[in-house]
Image (spheres, grey):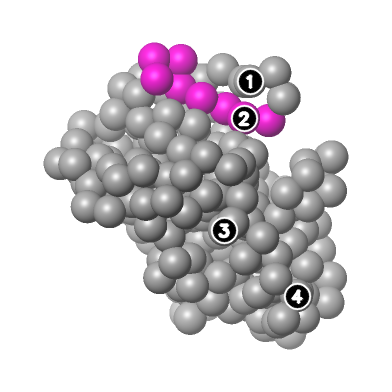
Amino acid sequence: MAEWKSEEEIRRIRRAGQVVAECHEAIAKRIAPGVTTQEIDRFVERLMAERGAWPAQKGYLGYPYATCASVNEVVCHGFPDTIPLQEGDMVTIDMVADVDGWKADSAWTYSIGRPQPTAARLLEGAKQAMLRGIAECRIGRRIGDIGAAVMQSARQSGHSVVTSFAGHGIGRAIHENPEVGNSGLSGSGVRLEAGMVLTVEPILTTGGGEIWLDRDGWTARTRDRSWSAQFEHTIAVTEQGPIILTCL
């Protein structure tokens, strides 16, 4: 069953979304060759605390960090570490802020220095796939329409989609119904209604979409070691159309 939020509850989620957006804006100014993902993780936790927020991923199902930091072939859920980022790397920073019990979720892939042409195309392809999915978050559309739009966009840009992970409802909990797949059939699945709050979060790769997990049980990598990129926003379905809650 999908869950619906009142206008006031959506405003509360948006407050958490503003914190996430502020963190991403600050990361974009700080991330550079030589910086470590552990430094970014600690910075995010401090900034959230200054804004009265809590990093909701920390402790969730035992996850030990405030952010997920996924470098190059890591598609998601990578652990922050002390390895300096290098010129040409790509890293996805994913985070969930909790403000007064309400949560918002967003991921962004950053290029370290100037990206190579293949990486630049991947970044643009992943961002466009997210935007195409968001455009389907309208009253009367269905969950399958989101996944179908993501898949079509990825194919047009020449990339594969990782279908092992999906978006989701969000609010009081990080993961709520419905699941928002990154592939699907148009016209299938749950019908979207005003008050739904969802994440749209496609992961695209330069190779295949198959993944495997590291021994830590969290870090997911592409099987063929191709690079990946992910963009994610938290979206409210409203009478006025989709509203992004994780932007400034």
- Is residue 166 shown left or right of residue 122? right
Q: CA distance from mark 1 to mark 4?
A: 30 Å
Circles 2, 1 touching at the beta carbon (< 8 Å): yes
Image point (73%, 49%), residue name: 65
Given residues 42 and 205, the one toward you in this image is 42
**Amino acid type assigned to the residue bearing label 1 in the image:** Asp
User: Can residue 78 be seen by looking at this rendering?
Assistant: yes
Q: Position of residue 14 (x, y in %)?
A: 63, 77
Distance (Cα) linking label 4 and label 2 = 26 Å
Left or right: residue 104 versus residue 220 is right
Residue behind mark 3: 40
Q: Comparing marks 3 and 4, which lies closer to the viewer?
A: 3
Out of 139 and 173, give the one closest to the viewer.
173
User: Whole-Å distance between the Cαs marked 3 and 2?
Assistant: 18 Å
Viewer-nearest residue: 167 or 89: 89
Residue in view at x 47 percent, y 54 percent: 35
Q: CA distance from mark 3 to mark 4?
A: 14 Å
Mark 1: give few (<14), some (14-19) or many (20+) Cα within 10 Å.
few
Say which label, 3 or 4, has the lower sequence index.
Answer: 3
Q: Which mark is residue 219?
A: 2
At numbered mark 2, what does the secondary structure look like: helix, strand or loop? Answer: loop
> Left or right of 126: which side holds 198?
right
Name the kind of residue labelled 3 in the image: Ile
Residue 50, compared with residue 37, is above or below; it is: below
Q: Which residue is mark 1?
A: 214
